[in-house]
Image: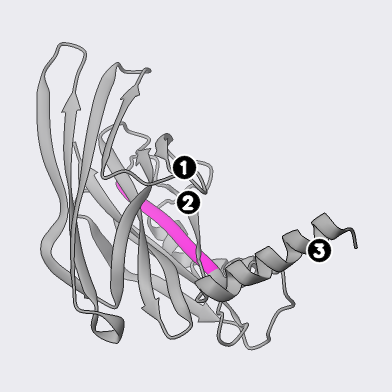
Amino acid sequence: MHKKGFLAFVLAITALSVFGGDAAVFQNLGFSPNGRYFMFAQYGVSENSSLPYAQIFTVEVPRNRFVPGGIRKTTARTTVEPGSDGRGALFNLLADALPLKKKYAIDHALTGRLLYILLDGAEPKPELEFRDFQVDKKYKVVLNQSSTGSGSGIKASFHLVVTVEDASGGIRSYTAGDPDYWRDGVRSYRVRQILLAPDGLSLVFAVERSEEDPAGASVRYMVETLKL
């Protein structure tokens, strides 16, 4: 191995050992044609057990609530080799979620329109401003979050203040999330993606949670939805 290659390898291993934990992958699984329901998943490989895991969630967008029985989870029984991202667990779980897909008319091809994405390695900002040029709307999203405690006793809450300005200059403000709801074991939040539903009447915020884990900081996902 060349010296530079070996150095890169050592740095990568060092970074992994410092970070610890495991980072799930967010997967958009699509909306219903009317934009009323949204399905998403997260998957990965447990740092502690090397077992792939996956979770699928189905949300009623206007109510910002899971549909009845809308959470499916699985953890594989067989460990995977280094380098695997665990997506096989998600593929297996999709069969279990098929009744939900049919009941709520989820179309995996209807993933909405991506209005914002936090690229890997980019510094998250507490205030986001962007424009939807297709309909000439301006958006401002402010992430407010608080945390208390430390170690295994840490917990955090958040909410989003969303301002939408239309082409005529009209401005509307909304709030997503609950500042009084504290999630145990969560260190912090950041907005990873913002999607516009196929009907153009709702927003879906994919929120990344940094969670306390014995092996380090783990990353999990949730969504907040907002009817415009």
Residue at numbered disc 2: 28
| Outermost residue to the top | 168
Which sits in the foreground, 74 or 181? 181
**Residue 92 visible in the shown view:** no
Q: Residue at x 48, y 64 (%)?
A: 42
N-terminal of the pair, mark 1 or mark 3, is 3
Mark 2 burial class by Cα count in 10 Å: few <14, some 14-19, many 20+: some
Amino acid at circle 3: Phe
Q: Where, quadrant-wise, is the C terminus in this rendering?
A: top left
Mark drawn on residue 168? none
Provide the residue span drawn in magenta: 36-43
**Residue 173 visible in the shown view:** yes
Amino acid at circle 2: Asn
Q: Evaluate if marks 2 and 1 touch, with contact meaning CB atoms under 8 Å apart.
A: yes
Residue at numbered disc 3: 6
* Horizontal side of residue 118 vs 59, given as left or right: right
Q: Where, quadrant-wise, is the N terminus in this rendering?
A: bottom right
Q: Evaluate if marks 1 and 3 touch, with contact meaning CB atoms under 8 Å apart.
A: no
Image coords of residue 50 (percent x, y)? 63, 83
Residue 5 figure quarter: bottom right
In the displayed structure, would residue 28 be above or below residue 19?
A: above
Mark 2: secondary structure:
strand
Mark 1 burial class by Cα count in 10 Å: few <14, some 14-19, many 20+: many
Mark drawn on residue 111? 1
Q: Which residue is drawn at 48% across and 47% down?
A: 107
Image coords of residue 119 (percent x, y)? 49, 43
